[in-house]
Amino acid sequence: MLYGINNKLSELLGHRPAVELWLTKTSADTSINFTDLDELLLARKYATQKQLRLIDDLVVEKLRTNSDPRNARPGMHRGYASYMARAWIRGLAECEELPDRIRAAAKACLDNYKPHTN
């Protein structure tokens, strides 16, 4: 099941409402690295076909709109957050378990990404 525990997805035996929780939480997150790769893969694993389309659309849209280093996680040093965001995006681009559409959006994001320098 899949459960949302402390705003993180946790796999227990197999449940769809947690995917809705993930979609809601991720939609509201405006940072570059808006989810963990493991959470994304779990959400995709348990999603219905409709949810899968929503997940993929959401991830691609967020990669297109949130790729500015100023959107790094709040409270984190900007230079470090920028580095971590780039590493996170590279992880998406290289993950063969993700559909081509997400990997292509991540690669485009990397190509256009300008690290925070201040």
Image (cartoon, helix red, strand yellow):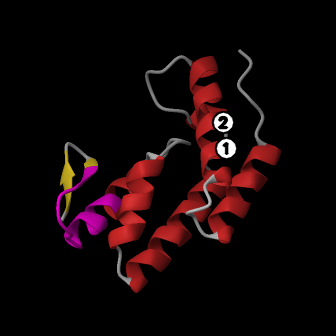
Residue drawn at 67 percent across, 53 percent down: 93
Q: Tell me if label 2 and label 1 are in contact, CB under 8 Å.
A: yes
Q: Position of residue 97 (x, y in %)?
A: 55, 63
Q: Which residues are magenta?
A: 9-22
Give amino acid for label 1.
Arg
Residue 86 got which mark? 2
Residue drawn at 67 percent across, 44 percent down: 90
Residue 36 in magenta stretch? no
Give amino acid for label 2.
Arg
Count all numbered tags in the image, as a single digit.
Answer: 2
- To which quarter of the image does residue 115 belong? top right
- To which quarter of the image does residue 24 belong? bottom left
Label 1: which secondary element? helix
Give neighbour class at mark 2: few <14, some 14-19, many 20+ (Cα, 10 Å).
many
Q: Residue furthest bottom?
A: 49
Circle 1 is placed at which residue position?
A: 90
The quadrant of the rendering that contains the N terminus is bottom left
